Image (spheres, rainbow, N blue to C red):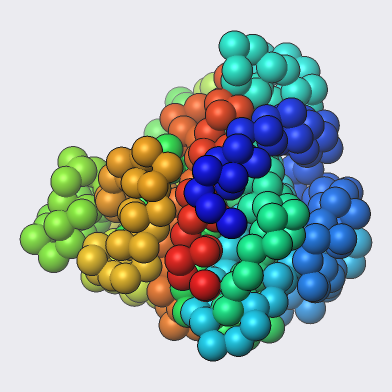
Amino acid sequence: MDEQNIAAYLGNQADRATGILSRLIEIPSVAGGEGPVAEYLHELLAGVADVCEFVPVTEAIKADPDYSSPLKGLKYGDRPNLRVVRQGSGGGKSVIFNTHMDVVPPSRQHEQPFTARLVDGNIYGRGACDAKGQIATLCLLLMALDELAIPLAGDVEVHFVIEEEVGGNGTVAMVRQEPRADACIVLEPTGFGIHPQIRGAVWFEVSVYGRAGHSGAPGGTVSALYKAIDAIEIFKSYHKRILAESRGHYPLFDQFENPMPLTIGQLEAGDFPSQAPQTAVFKGVLGLLPDRTKEQVMAEMRQALRTEGDEWLAEHFEIDFTYRHDASIIEPDHELVQALERAAGAQGVAAEVAAMTASCDAWMYNNQLGIPTVVFGPGELGVAHSNQEHIAGGDLLTGAGILLDFVRSWCG
C-alpha cells in the first residue's frame, strides 16, 4: 500500500480515535481499578490481532524483588495485563510496545475528571495524555495493520500493563514472562521527543523518633521534627554530591540543571503545639542517573543518615524504599533511535533526541531483558497529572502514523 493511501486512511480515523480515548477516560482506572480497561481493550482488539490475551497478575507478584508498594492494600487477581501480538511472516526484526492502563487520582479542583471533553481539538480528562492517549494511539496502530493488511516479517507485540504509576508492577509481571524482541518502545507523553536515556528513582519513607515532652522542659525532650529536618538536609547534601559526580558522563543529562531532582512531598509530626513530637515521618523521591544503581543509592542514603547527622539521629530512624527503578540508557545514535527519527520525519515531525528526567518502566526491558528501549509518544508531560490534563486529538493520528511508518520499516 502506498503512502498516499495510508495517509488518507489515517486522516479518516479522527472520530474513532476520539471515541476510543473518550471511552478509556470514562473508566476510573486508578491503581486497583484497571480491570475494566483490560476488558474493553480485549473486546476492541481481539479481532485485529493474532494473539489477544489476558496475562494475570497475582498476589505472588508481592514476592518479586522488584515489586514496589507505595500504596498499601492493593489486591491482585482481577486486574490482568493485556498482551496483543500481530505475528510477522518470519525473518524480520520484532518490536514490543508498552504503555499503562492505570492513572493517578484526580487533582484538586479537577471537575469531572472521568468525563472526556473535546475543546478546540483537545481531549480533556484524567489519563488523556498519561497514558490513555498512548493506549488509543497503539489501538489505531493495530487496527491500521489489520485493516490495511500491511505485510510484516517481524512480530509486533503490545503490552498494556497495570500499576506503572505506583512502581511498575504490571511490567514486572510481563518481564518475568521473558518476552524477546529486537526493540522496545515505551509510550509516555514526550511531545514526540525520543528518549533513549531515562533516569531512575527511589521513593522513600523515613520515620524519625525523638523523646516527647512538655515545651517547658526542653532539656528532657528531643524533637523528632527537628531531627527529621536534619535528615532532609542530609539528603539535600547527598543529592547535590551525586549530581556533581554524574556530570560529564552523560551529555544528554548534562543539558539539564537538575535531571534527577530530590522531592520531599510529605512531612507529618506531632500531636500538640506545645509538645515536642515523638515521631516525624517524611516521604519523598530521589532521582538517579546511570552511574549508580538503585541498590547503591538506597545503601548510600541509609549510610548518610547514620554518619552525617548527630548521634541521636544515627540511632533513631527507619527508612523504607517503596519504589525502586534503575536508570536506562542506549546510545543516541542507536539504530532504534535513528529508525524512529526517520519515521517521525516522514510524518513531518522533527523528533528531538533527549534524556528523560522522569522515571518509567523502560529499564525493565532494557536492563533486565537486554532489549534496546526508548520512550516516545504523543502528549505533553507538563499537563500530565494536572487538573488540565489533555491531549491534542491530531497528535493521536500523528503518533499512529509515526509508529506505523516505524513498524513498516523495522519489522518489514
Q: Is residue 258 left or right of residue 86?
A: left
Counting from the top left corner in percent of width and height, residue 156 is at 62, 70
- Above or below for 70 versus 127: below
At x 64%, y 63%, the residue is 150
- Above or below for 125 versus 90: above
At x 34%, y 46%, the residue is 345
Counting from the top left corner in percent of width and height, residue 383 is at 50, 27
Q: Is residue 114 left or right of residue 274?
A: right
Q: Is residue 127 left or right of residue 249?
A: right
Residue 9 vs residue 13, the one in the foreground: 9
Q: Quadrant of the N terminus?
A: bottom right
Counting from the top left corner in percent of width and height, residue 335 is at 31, 71
Residue 109 vs residue 137, the one in the foreground: 137
- Above or below for 67 versus 346: below
Residue 265 vs residue 369, the one in the foreground: 369
- Above or below for 241 versus 169: above
